[in-house]
Structure formats: structure tokens, C-alpha cells
Amino acid sequence: MRAGDMDRRIIVSQPGEIIDYDPFGSPIYGDPTEYEVWAHVSQQSGREFFAAGGIQSSRMVVFRLRWIDGITVLDTVKYGGRDHNIQEVRELGRKEGLELHTITSG
């Protein structure tokens, strides 16, 4: 993976660990872990659909970045003022990099 291809700054955010539970049994999370890294961004596709009387749009975006251990589909990517939900995590090489397939709405 060439460093020159990674020309966008993104933030990969992992939810904090459960530190307690509220009186109703819902978990209370601690501070999230965030990694600010360089990445290559590739817009895959977009679509619009009708939902609840309005038009909704979604975009599929692929981010390629250097290896970060422990990234899962429970994490999110912050880029371009939007949160991108990770749908798939692919390993590139032998822990050389990651390819994050995401979807965002709005």
C-alpha cells in the first residue's frame, strides 16, 4: 500500500467499554477510543429510496488504511462530517492494511 494514495484524514471510533448499568439495565459506556489516520477513500455507489414519507439517501464508501488491531463492524468511521457504519473489514496482505466497507446515510 503506497503512502501517497492515502491522502484523506479519517477518524476510526471504537465504542467505550461498558463501565456500569443504569437502573433500567441499559449499559453505560466509557469514553470511546479514536484513531485519527490517513486513508484512501473510494466512493463505491449511492442510492435514494423513499422511507417514512421522505427521500433517504445512502452511500457506500471504502476506506483503505494502515493496519489497526481490533477494528470490527461495531466501530464507525468519521469522514466528511458524517458517521460511516462499517459493514465489512478486510485484511490487506499480512496485517499490512485494512479495507473498511462502510455505508452512510443522509
Image (tube, rainbow, N blue to C red):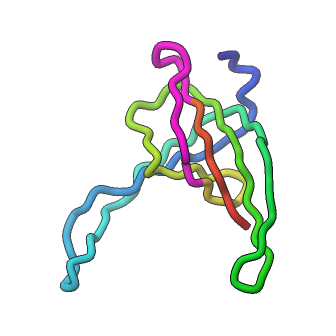
Q: Nearer the viewer, residue 66 or 104?
A: 104
The residue that appears at 28% across and 70% down in the rendered structure is 28
In-image side of 34 versus 27 (left or right): right
Give percent across and percent down for residue 17.
28, 56
Q: Nearer the viewer, residue 82 or 105?
A: 105
Q: Is residue 106 above or below residue 94?
A: below
Q: Is residue 60 magenta?
A: no
Q: Is residue 54 above or below residue 87?
A: below
Quadrant housing residue 15 = bottom left
The residue that appears at 57% across and 54% down in the rendered structure is 85
* Residues in magenta, as a range: 85-98
Give percent across and percent down for residue 64.
64, 31
Q: Is residue 92 magenta?
A: yes
Q: Main secondary structure of the magenta part?
A: strand
Screen quadrant of the N terminus = top right
The residue that appears at 22% across and 80% down in the rendered structure is 22
The residue that appears at 56% across and 42% down in the rendered structure is 36
